[in-house]
Image (cartoon, rainbow, N blue to C red):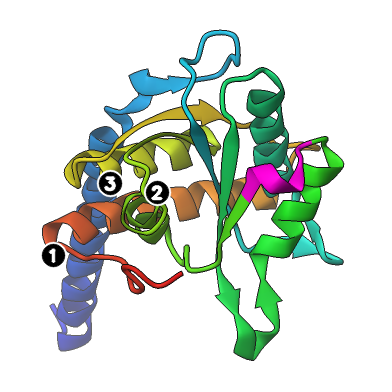
Amino acid sequence: MSRIGRTRRIVLFWTAAALIAALEAVLTAGWLVGKTSARIYSSANDIPAREVGMVLGCSEFSNGRPSPTLAGRLQAAAELYHAGKVHKLVVSGADYPEKFYNEIPAMTRGLVALGVPENAIAGDNKGLRTLDSVLRMRDVFGYDDFITISQRNHCERALYLADHHGITTIGFEAGISSGLYLDEWLGSAIRASLSNVKAILDIAIDRHAKYPTER
């Protein structure tokens, strides 16, 4: 066999090995994170009441308005509020002043438009990641028992991280307000899988919030 042929076989072997290892990591992370799924509710009638709900933000906006994914979370949060399942909502997202980008105002406006009083909404603009949002609910806002509001796979990840840090939370599954195109759905599925792996790594290296106490 020529040297080029041997090199090609070696490259193919290690490429295949890397892909298998990556797939195994994704599947393992999905299984571990998915063990929290039993504590996620899809009906406002069934979920136990809590004082506060945490609405997780996302970075997808269109013309200053929430994306279909975030709009679904806001609708779910408003549903819980109007059903008397929560009395306060913390909207947790990112604020990047240097990029003129802040998720909190759009989230707050969206909830107010859905009939939630503004005085029942608190904003956390240091919720840079799911881990930060979860930890800051306890360490900054003083809640260690609350409802997490997002799509199911995001709730699973938040509950998994909360469990590790001794925080009690249950999840409320949000829908997607107007659906996603196929490429958006695939992109979302890939991001969710990689985020599961990231959550496992966050626990493995004992990562904490970037801004642990700053309001």
Residue 94 vs 82, above or below: the answer is below
Q: What number is the disc on residue 205?
A: 1
Query: Do the CB atoms of the residues marked 3 and 2 lie less than 8 Å apart?
Result: no
Q: Residues within 10 Å of mark 1 (few under 14, many from 20)?
A: few
At numbered mark 2, what does the secondary structure look like: helix, strand or loop?
Answer: helix
Q: What residue span does the magenta drawing correspond to? A: 116-121
Residue at 81% x, 37% y: name it. Answer: 178
Q: Residues within 10 Å of mark 2 (few under 14, many from 20)?
A: some
Query: Do the CB atoms of the residues marked 2 and 1 lie less than 8 Å apart?
Result: no
Amino acid on which disc 3 is placed:
Leu
Estimate the spatial distance between the alpha carbons at disc 2 and disc 1, rounded to whole Å: 19 Å
Residue 87 appears at what percent x and percent y?
Answer: 59, 31
At numbered mark 1, what does the secondary structure look like: helix, strand or loop?
Answer: loop
- Quarter of the picture containing the N terminus is bottom left
Does 127 sit left or right of 20 as displayed? Answer: right
The picture quadrant where one finds residue 174 is: top right
Which numbered disc, 3 or 2, marks the residue that appears first in the sequence?
A: 3
Amino acid on which disc 2 is placed:
Ser
Q: Is residue 184 magenta?
A: no
Query: Do the CB atoms of the residues marked 3 and 1 lie less than 8 Å apart?
Result: no
Q: Nearer the viewer, residue 14 or 180?
A: 180
Disc tally is 3
What residue is shown with label 2?
Answer: 193
Residue 20 appears at what percent x and percent y?
Answer: 23, 52
Residue 212 vs 157, above or below: the answer is below
Which numbered disc, 2 or 1, marks the residue that appears first in the sequence?
A: 2
What residue is shown with label 3?
Answer: 161
Residue at 45% x, 49% y: name it. Answer: 192
Q: Residues within 10 Å of mark 3 (few under 14, many from 20)?
A: many
- Front position among marks 2 and 1: 1
Amino acid on which disc 1 is placed:
Ile
Task: Kindly tell me whether residue 181 is visible in this rendering.
Answer: no
